[in-house]
Amino acid sequence: MADQDKLPVRLGPVPETLLWNLYHRAYEARQPRTVLHDPKAIELVDRLDYPFEETFDPPHPLLAQGQALRVRTFDDAVRNFLAEHPDGTVVNLAEGLETQYWRIDNGRAHWLCVELPETAELRRALLPDTERRRTLARSVLDLSWQDEVDPARGVLITAQGLLMYLRPGEVRELIAACAERFRGGALVFDAVPRWLGAATLRGEKGPARNYRMPGMPWSLNAGELPKVRTAHPGVVDVRELHLPRGRGPYFGALTPLLYRLPGVRNLRPTMTAIARFA
C-alpha cells in the first residue's frame, strides 16, 4: 500500500497501547507456525501511517507470542460462550483495534464495542459498523452503555487490556455494575501483577527502549483473584484461564508450570480470568 493511502493515527498515551497490541499480534500472525491466525491484524498494520518500529522497537518474538496466546485465551472464552448462546451479545470494553470478531464470529451473535471517542473514530474508519457489530463512543465508566445491551439471549463482557488503567475503585464499581445488570452473564478480563503495576507507576521503561507504558493503577496478583468476588454478591465464581500451549520450550513446557508453583506464579506479566454472575 502506498504511503499516501495510509491512515494517519495519533492517540493519547493510554489509547496508544492498542497500537502496541496490534503491532505484536500482527507480527506473530506473520510467523510460519503462528499460534494466532489473524490476517485482519496484518491488514490493519499495513493500513496505518504510524512509526511502529521507531516507537515500539522491532518486535520481540517471545513477547509477541505471549501476547497472541493471551488473545487466544480471550478467544476461547468467547467461543465457549457462543457455543452456549449462539444469538447472544458480546460486549468488548475498550478493545481498541482487536480483531476478535473476524477470528471467531459465528454469523449470528451481536457485538458491541465501547470505546473512548478518539479510539471509536479510528476503529470506525478502519472497521466500519455492520448490522450485528457496532462501536459505541463512550467511556466504559459511563454506565449508560449498558442500556445498549439486550441481555435476553446471554451476555459476555470482555475487558482486554483495560482494567489495569483504571483506579481500583473504578474497577470495583465497573465489576459490581456488570454483576448487577447482567445476571447470568460473565466478564473476562486480564490483570497485571503488583510488581508490574508498581513499576509502571514509578515510570520505569518496559522492554522497548523508546516507549514507556502508561501507569497502571490497578494490579492483582494471581493469589488474590478471590478478592474479585467481594465487588458484588452477584459475582459467584472467579477463576483463572490458562494460556494454550505455544511454540518453543517457554510456552510449550515451562508456562504450564508457572500456574502450579506458588513462588513464581505472581511473576507472570499478565493473568486472564473469568468472573461469572448470578
Image (tube, rainbow, N blue to C red):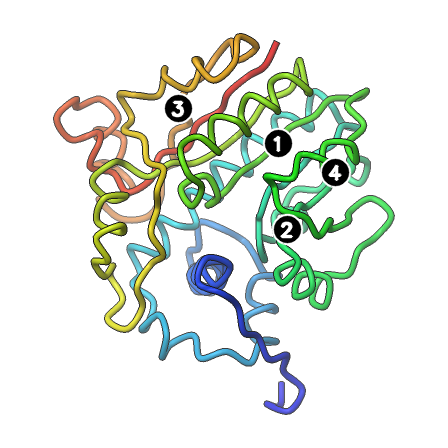
Direction left: furthest residue: 263
Alpha carbon distance from label 2 to label 3: 26 Å
Decide: few, some or many residues near mark 3? Use Cα within 10 Å; few <14, some 14-19, many ≥20: some
Q: Is residue 206 above or below residue 9?
A: above
Mark found first going from the N terminus, 4 or 2? 4
Alpha carbon distance from label 3 to label 1: 16 Å
Where in the figure is residue 223, as x and y percent of width and height?
26, 21
Q: Quadrant of residue 169?
A: top left
Q: Is residue 180 above or below residue 72?
A: above
Question: Mark 4 or mark 2, which is nearer to you?
Answer: 2
Looking at the image, residue 228 sits to the left or right of residue 199; the answer is right
Name the residue tied to disc 4.
Answer: 106
Alpha carbon distance from label 4 to label 1: 17 Å
Find numbered disc 4 in the image and state the secondary structure of the residue it sits on: loop
* Residue displayed at 21% across by 29% down: 265
Q: Amino acid at mark 3?
A: Glu
Name the residue tied to disc 1.
Answer: 157
Mark found first going from the N terminus, 3 or 1? 1
Question: Mark 3 or mark 1, which is nearer to you?
Answer: 1
Is there CB contact under 8 Å for labels 3 and 4?
Answer: no
Looking at the image, residue 84 sits to the left or right of residue 223; the answer is right
Q: Is residue 91 above or below residue 237?
A: below
Where in the figure is residue 185, as x and y percent of width and height?
65, 19
Question: Mark 3 or mark 4, which is nearer to you?
Answer: 3
Where in the figure is residue 130, as x and y percent of width and height?
83, 53
Mark found first going from the N terminus, 1 or 2? 2
Is there CB contact under 8 Å for labels 2 and 3?
Answer: no
Q: Amino acid at mark 2?
A: Glu
Q: Amino acid at mark 4?
A: Asn
Name the residue tied to disc 2.
Answer: 115
Decide: few, some or many residues near mark 4? Use Cα within 10 Å; few <14, some 14-19, many ≥20: some
Mark found first going from the N terminus, 2 or 3? 2
